[in-house]
Amino acid sequence: MRIRPARTSDVRAMRGLVAPLAEQRVLLQKEAVAYYESVGDFVVAERDGEVVGCGAIHVLWEDLAEIRTLAVSSAALGHGIGSRILERLVARAGELGVERLFCLTFETDFFRRHGFTPIEGQAVEPSVYAELLRSYDEGVAEFLDLERVKPNTLGNTRMLRVL
C-alpha cells in the first residue's frame, strides 16, 4: 500500500469512499466540482491499484489548516490506513509552514491518538475570525462554527493539534 498525491482520475473513487459515510452523516457529501477544485489538497491510499482511502489538508490561515474528508474503505478498516494518511497530511502541514491543525470529527479517539485535543470556542484571534468570515468555503464556515452549518455538524467535536 502506498500514500500518494491524489490525481483527477481518483475523484470518482474518493467520492465513492465518502458516499457511505455521508449517508451515515459522518462526512459531508460534496459535489464533484468541489473535489476537482481541491484535488491538490488530497492524498490517497492505493492498494493493488485501488484507492482505499483519502484525506485532505486545506489551509485556512497563515498558521492554521484543516484536516478534511479523511475516509477509508470499510473493507480496509483496521489496517492503519487512516493513520498513514493522517501522518502524510501532518507532514504536508509542516512543509506548508502550518503550526496548527483543526478537524471537525466524530472520530475523537482516532484523532486524540494522533495528538489532537478537543477545543471550545474559536481557535483564532477576533481579527482573523473577521477575515475568515469573508470566505465562501463551507469548511471555513464549519471551522468558525457558524449557525448556518450547525445542522451539518451536529454532534461533531472540534479538535486541534499544535505541531
Image (cartoon, rainbow, N blue to C red):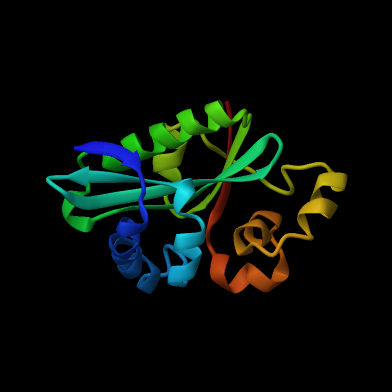
Q: Residue furthest right?
A: 127
Answer with left or right where residue 92 lies relative to residue 141.
Answer: left
Kindly indicate the quadrant of the structure image that contains residue 27.
bottom left
Task: Estimate the x, y position of residue 119 in percent, counting from the top left.
Answer: 64, 43
Q: Residue furthest front?
A: 8
Q: Which residue is painted at 78% across and 59% down in the image?
A: 133
Image quadrant containing the C terminus = top right
Q: Nearer the viewer, residue 142 or 52?
A: 52
Kindly indicate the quadrant of the structure image that contains residue 81.
top left
Task: Estimate the x, y position of residue 49 in percent, counting from the top left.
Answer: 15, 48
**Across the whole image, how many numbered discs are drawn on residues?**
0
Q: Is residue 153 above or below residue 62?
A: below
Q: Is residue 128 above or below residue 22?
A: above
Q: Which residue is painted at 76% across and 42% down in the image?
A: 124
Asked whether the viewer can see residue 30, the reply is: no
Asked whether the viewer can see residue 36, the reply is: yes
Q: Which residue is painted at 66% across and 57% down in the image?
A: 140
Q: Which residue is painted at 73% across and 60% down in the image?
A: 135
Answer with left or right where residue 96 lies relative to residue 5.
Answer: right
Answer with left or right where residue 47 lies relative to residue 148.
Answer: left
Q: Is residue 150 above or below residue 89?
A: below
Q: Nearer the viewer, residue 146 or 133?
A: 133
Image quadrant containing the N terminus = top left
Task: Estimate the x, y position of residue 90 in percent, counting from the top left.
Answer: 48, 32
Answer with left or right where residue 143 lies relative to residue 116.
Answer: right
